[in-house]
Amino acid sequence: MANVPADSVLSLTDQRLVAALQCDGRLTAERAAQVLGLGAATVRRRLHTLTADGTVRVVVSPVARPRNGGSAGALFLRIRVLRGKLDTIVAALAAREDIPFIDVTTAGDEIFAVARTEPGSRDPLVFRQLPSTQAVTSLDSATILHVFRLTSEWRHTVLTPAERAALSRTDPQAEPATERVRPSAGSPGPYGVDTDPVEQSLIDALTPDARLSAAALAARTGHPESTVRRRVTQLTAQGRLVTQVLVDPRRLGLPIEAKLLLHVAPDHLAAAGQALADHPAVHGAFATSGPSNLHAAAYFPDLTALYGFLSRDLSGLGITQVETAIVSRAAKRTPPLGGEPPARATATRRRPPARVGEGKG
């Protein structure tokens, strides 16, 4: 993963535009140009190029921060397999709708994955299917107990704090909601809040492309453009339309991704988790069950930066043990990273999870 040709790294201007979209996925070219000191025509051209070729995708985030940081129900899986069987197991896991993230490490026989599950349940994948698969040599699972940082909250550090504040949809000057929420019974939205049919239709239309214009949304949903503008503003102001920028971190000059399994004394766990969440390199931080009670994931420009993070930035946090795994391949991201084809739409009837080589070598 570290061997990235220099010419594949985006220019600083493009990286700043990516960072601007992280602040506000529906940012206009005019606003970006004003804050970043660029020409509006340049911004329009660069944004069109970045999104047209799939380098950058802006989507509605499929994962939102649970209330008070709690977990909505997910497991971290660490799976070791027989050499020569890695691709087979990865493919079987990737076919499952309840596995949104899969990473393969440089160890060559190791997979990290996230599985959606009901808290406290005997998940068949963990209790039966993976253990009975002869190609799987070991399996560790840990329940996510608390969320400190989600990938959708990570920001590329190429903007000044003033620029980021000016671009953020959470800026105090952001337009407030102007219409009262009218929830309909039994129609939960993506963040656990009931949505009415108009809101849900807008969210569905924006999910694969959060930068659709109000006119395009009106055409797709059949709602008046004035209603679309008002409702999108309302959803955003209420924090119910969270966008996420999908871009290969290697294009941002960050070819090293590390998974960190940390042992932290209980009285330091909250502070250590928050310190990691506040670190600019960290794009995921979670308190978990198990001996490694704090998991983190971070991007780095090189191994020297990773070493500096381990030797300096983790000191004084009450961490007693660190295990580091370097990602060689991001095998699955839901939604897919820019450049990957979106998954084919599934039928209305939900498919059962794919079995993972149960009882087979």
Image: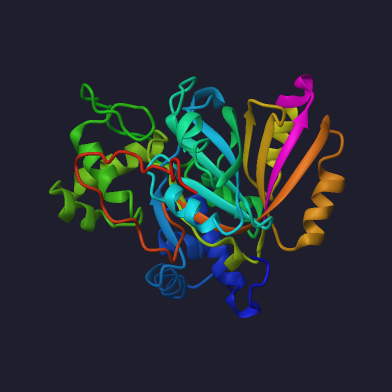
Dividing the picture into quarters, in which one does residue 196 lie?
Answer: top left
Residue 262 colored in magenta in the image:
yes
Res. 149 visible in picture: yes
Residue positioned 24% across, 28% down in the render: 187
Direction from residue 12 to residue 133 in the image, left or right: left
| On-image quarter of the N terminus | bottom right
Above or below residue 10? Residue 278 is: above
Give residue 55's position: percent from left, percent from top. Answer: 46, 68
Give x and y (percent) for residue 176: 39, 36
**336 and 218: which is toward the camera:** 336
Left or right of 157? Residue 100 is left
Residue 211 in the figure: left or right of residue 267: left
In the image, is 78 to the left or to the right of 29?
right
> x, y (%) of residue 57?
42, 60
Q: Is residue 30 above or below residue 232?
A: below
* Count of marks placed on residues: 0
Magenta range: 257-270
Q: Residue furthest bottom?
A: 7
**Residue 360 placed where, x, y %?**
46, 46
Nearer to us in this view, 177 or 357:
357
Which residue is depicted at the point 64% across and 29% down?
287
Answer whether residue 355 is magenta in the image.
no
Q: Quadrant of residue 178?
A: top left
At 57% across and 38% down in the image, what residue appears? 77
